[in-house]
Amino acid sequence: MAINTGDMDVAVIGGGVIGLTSAIALAEDGHRVRVVSRDAVDGTTSAVAGGLCWPYRIRPYERAVQWSVRSFHALTALAQRPEETGARMVTGTMTDTTHGGGDDARQCPGDRPDDDLAAWYDAVPGLRRASAEELPEGHAAGWRARTPLVDMPAHLRYLERRLTAAGGTVERHEVTSPAEAGRTADVVVNCSGLGARELVPDPDVHPVQGQLVIVDNPGIEEWYVSADAGSAETTYVLPQPYGVVLGGTARENVWSREPDPAVAEAIVARCARRFPELAGARIRAHKVGLRPARPAVRLAVERLPDGTPCVHNYGHGGAGVTVSWGCADEVLRSVRALREGAGPLGR
């Protein structure tokens, strides 16, 4: 298919946070954009996410931090209108129980001057090392920061409204391949998340199961996370308008979406060790999400069999909202390059 020299018809596959931010960037740049999604926003993996803006379980590290910094600033601006956007600025503590060692530890706080997240630490205003008095027993290091914390269901609805206001549309149906979506488009943007495993197909895409519990808020105002990157168990407490999100798990290649009662009990117990008042909080809901993981995010352009360009943007693991706007910027740059006839192609 020949590329138009003017604004283009773009089909975006996927209606989660990655797909919607990519679609908004394109629509606000003047392109004709339609999002194709099997699920309504409340049924996407993004809707289950805790919503803390912080790089987690995502590679490559250097690019992920760049994307995260861009998203941090975008979400900070949106947090000026929390009721509209679902984004708020909330202070909290990120701790590390391992404190160094191994490649995966690079996603957690540490003292190494070559830490891969150094640019992230520098970019977050007011971020500082937690004092010993501010850390729970058994934690060797940590950070105190004020970061965006996003009510994801509300945020996704805001993104849909913003897309519509920019002239974009959303269609609710399933596609079987990028080529199918590209039959009536100049460019396809593939933000299918875990679905890319079958849609592309890409066998490197796999789930990292996350289970969480939502409870009534007994008065907690700050977020708290203790998440060793290589562990199947994490501890996080995220106060949201609809209750406190307690987590969690990070189980590689587990496909079940059914909450496990024993796991839920363990999650509450871990969180209650940090905030004892959570032990008696009324449980409002149990949820399970499948993070769309990959050895590295795939953000690249390739040609479909009929020649239509496809910008792949998937494999963001546990950092979808954290990198969403940064990745959307790259998608926009790729589409602009294609329009100008200089689009890079890669795998």
Image (cartoon, rainbow, N blue to C red):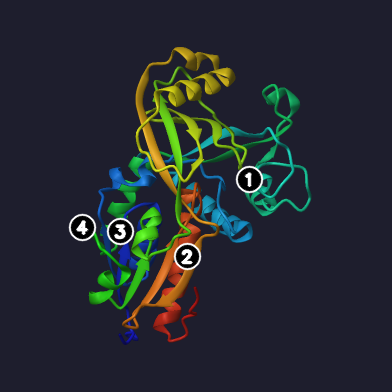
* 3 is higher (above) or lower (below) than 168: below
Mark 2 vs mark 1, CA separation in Å: 22 Å
- Residue carrying label 2: 329
Looking at the rendered image, the quarter that the N terminus falls into is bottom left
Between label 3 and label 1, give the one nearer the viewer: 3
Q: Which residue is mark 3?
A: 163
Numbered tag placed on residue 125 in the rendering: 1
- Name the mark nearer the viewer: 2 or 4: 4
**Residues under numbered marks 2 and 1 in contact, where contact means CB atoms less than 8 Å apart:** no
Three-letter code, disc 4: His
Q: Crowding near pointer 2: few (<14 within 10 Å), some, many (20+)?
A: some
Q: Give the amino acid at mark 2.
A: Asp
Residue 48 x %, y %: 38, 40
Please tell me whether mark 1 sits on a helix, a strand or a loop.
Answer: loop
First reached walking from the N terminus: tag 3 or tag 1:
1
The residue under label 4 is 173
Q: Residue at x 29, y 53 (%)?
A: 160
> Label 1 is placed on what type of residue?
Pro
Say above or below: 8 vs 48. below
User: Is there a contact, CB below 8 Å, between mark 1 and mark 4?
Assistant: no
Q: Secondary structure at mark 4?
A: loop
Q: CA distance from mark 2 to mark 4?
A: 26 Å
